[in-house]
């Protein structure tokens, strides 16, 4: 049945034979659970460590916070724009479906391919191994250097702008712990989306409370005169230091390349590698659209509420760090205040801040908070990622078995297991850390393409039902395209080691797409 005056999104031919009694995805995720997936997937381990690198890059408290404001603006515009697409096409697969419908199946596949190869699985691997590292605070036997089976060390090799290798292959007690978490979460999420959502709700609430406690402590008992004088100074002079339009900042081009001086705009783009990575994965709720109640309302609303909450928390946490620790510090300093934010031990700024506030037990409390955060993040990404591969399989672009649901629990069992298997291999290979360097550029490219898709669909299907329309269209989506493209250009110029490998990984999907698209539908 068609609605007069409207052009509906066409239904695609399904290469999998849908019997009348075949299991279907169950819409059981309410607004709270949907928002918890957004928040839980976004907050992993990044906010606890990336501030050190941002502080070193900007060398200015004002620019340090400015980097988070740029990230917040980009992410919120992205979420507002994706809300329209989610309301138009509330189907499992989310962003994969939007790219497929707006730009064609190749672009949808390239997104799904990169998601499976690097973005989703690489992040899950990194977050789960981070869980193992911080569990080592309580159990020292768990360590990345405590090898149970060390297979090989792969030395670094530079090929043009790419640096390959520099990996430790094998099983340590830390990545074994990570592997156990990967498998546990895959199995748990087989037993229904409601169970996975329950775990997500509990851990998201716990991590939100722990970050709220960190903010409260930083703004009250943690506030100290040394940090204030160093970061804000008399008349806020220290706050604005090195933030003027004429200020120049050193950036190393590539690996081992020359040091060059860049202006404020360029340095803010360069440090987005860290802040955007920390704020990424907000789009994961769109992957689960087929299991969200009233998706035309709840997905756009959860995107706005979830991203708004996380970005506010991130800004307040980073501001809290400035109240507790000086930005500038000595890498050889013997105290937390002497090392500052820039040179916090192993970049663990949150741990340093909480130790400064609570000298006895601060490190343990922060380790516990990060365990909660990483577990919840890994669960949300595990739950969401499998739905993309499920949608790809339904289009005949992935293994046929991945497009089938468990007859009782209505979950994509094969998708969860395939995702877990590849993630485990990344954990053992040690390659996930290097692959994560390439994620943000590849993600930005797909975000740009998806926002372009918003314009394309407005042109191609002007009368299609849009229960929610992107706020600020066309100005804000166009602003997103300009800013994101600008960041990509800067990263291509100054950080080629993060960009060209990401492009190569995406382009490798083209022959894979040609292979899958030409396979007989009956092939598994």
Image (cartoon, rainbow, N blue to C red):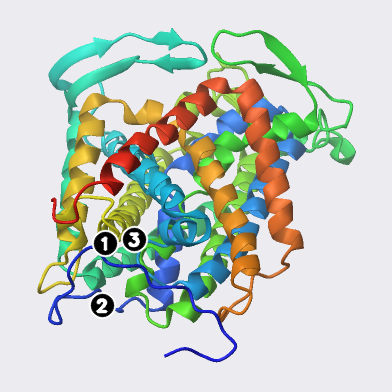
Name the image quarter holding the N terminus: bottom left
Q: Secondary structure at mark 1?
A: helix
Q: Residue under circle 2?
A: 26
- Relative horizontal placement of residue 96, taking residue 473 as reference (left or right): left
Q: Say which label, 1 or 2, has the lower sequence index.
A: 2
Q: Secondary structure at mark 3?
A: helix
Q: Secondary structure at mark 2?
A: loop
In this view, 404 is above or below 20:
above
- Residue positioned 17% across, 42% down in the render: 421
Return the mark for residue 24. none
For marks 1 and 2, give the one nearer the viewer.
1
User: Gap in Å between the C-alphas at discs 2 and 3?
Assistant: 23 Å
Return the mark for residue 394. 1
Q: Residue under circle 3?
A: 203
For marks 2 and 3, give the one nearer the viewer.
2
Q: Residue 113 is drawn in which quadrant?
A: top left
Identify which residue, 452 or 155, lies in the foreground. Answer: 452
Horizontal and vertical percent position of residue 512: 31, 38
- Residue positioned 36% across, 52% down in the render: 377
Identify which residue, 342 or 220, lies in the foreground. Answer: 342
Local packing at callout 1 (Cα closer than 10 Å; few below 14, some 14-19, many 20+) is: many
């Amino acid at each position: 049945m068609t609605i007069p005056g409207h052009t509906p999104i066409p239904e695609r031919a399904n290469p999998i034979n849908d019997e009348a009694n075949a299991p279907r995805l169950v819409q059981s995720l309410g607004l709270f659970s949907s928002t918890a997936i957004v928040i839980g997937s976004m907050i992993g381990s990044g906010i606890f460590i990336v501030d050190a690198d941002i502080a070193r890059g900007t060398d200015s408290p004002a620019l340090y916070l400015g980097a988070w404001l740029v990230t917040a603006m980009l992410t919120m515009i992205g979420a507002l724009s994706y809300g329209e697409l989610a309301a138009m096409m509330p189907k499992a697969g989310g962003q994969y479906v939007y790219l497929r419908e707006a730009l064609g199946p190749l672009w949808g596949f390239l997104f799904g391919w990169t998601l499976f190869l690097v973005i989703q699985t690489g992040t899950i691997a990194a977050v789960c191994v981070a869980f193992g590292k911080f569990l080592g605070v309580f159990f020292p036997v768990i360590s990345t250097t405590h090898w149970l089976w060390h297979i090989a060390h792969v030395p670094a090799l530079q090929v043009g702008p790419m640096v390959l290798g520099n990996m430790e292959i094998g099983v340590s007690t830390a990545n074994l712990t990570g592997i156990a978490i990967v498998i546990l979460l895959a199995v748990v999420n087989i037993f229904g989306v409601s169970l996975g959502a329950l775990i997500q709700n509990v851990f998201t609430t716990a991590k939100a409370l722990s970050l709220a406690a960190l903010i409260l402590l930083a703004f009250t008992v943690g506030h100290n005169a040394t940090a204030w004088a160093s970061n804000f100074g008399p008349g806020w002079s220290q706050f604005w230091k090195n933030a003027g339009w004429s200020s120049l900042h050193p950036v190393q081009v590539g690996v081992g390349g020359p040091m060059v001086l860049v202006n404020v705009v360029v340095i803010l783009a360069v440090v987005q590698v860290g802040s955007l990575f920390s704020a990424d994965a907000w789009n994961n709720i769109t992957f689960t659209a087929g299991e969200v109640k009233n998706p035309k309302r709840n997905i756009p609303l959860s995107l706005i509420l979830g991203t708004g909450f996380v970005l506010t928390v991130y800004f307040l946490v980073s501001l809290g760090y400035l109240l507790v620790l000086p930005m500038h510090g000595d890498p050889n300093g013997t105290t937390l205040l002497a090392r500052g934010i820039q040179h916090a031990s192993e970049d663990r700024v949150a741990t340093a801040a909480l130790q400064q506030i609570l000298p006895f037990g601060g490190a343990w409390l922060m380790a516990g908070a990060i365990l909660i955060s990483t577990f919840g993040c890994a669960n949300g990404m595990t739950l969401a990622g499998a739905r993309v591969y499920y949608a790809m399989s339904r289009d005949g672009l992935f293994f046929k078995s991945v497009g089938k649901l468990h007859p009782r629990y209505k979950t994509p069992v094969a998708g969860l297991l395939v995702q877990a298997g590849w993630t485990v291999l990344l954990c053992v290979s040690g390659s996930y850390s290097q692959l994560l360097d390439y994620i943000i550029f590849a993600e930005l490219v797909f975000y740009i393409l998806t926002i372009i898709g918003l314009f394309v669909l407005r042109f191609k299907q002007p009368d299609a039902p849009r229960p929610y329309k992107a706020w600020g269209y066309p100005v804000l989506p166009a602003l997103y395209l300009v800013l994101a493209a600008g960041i990509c250009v800067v990263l291509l110029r100054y950080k080629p080691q993060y960009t060209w490998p990401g492009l190569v990984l995406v382009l490798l999907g083209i022959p894979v797409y040609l292979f899958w698209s030409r396979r007989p539908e009956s092939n598994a």
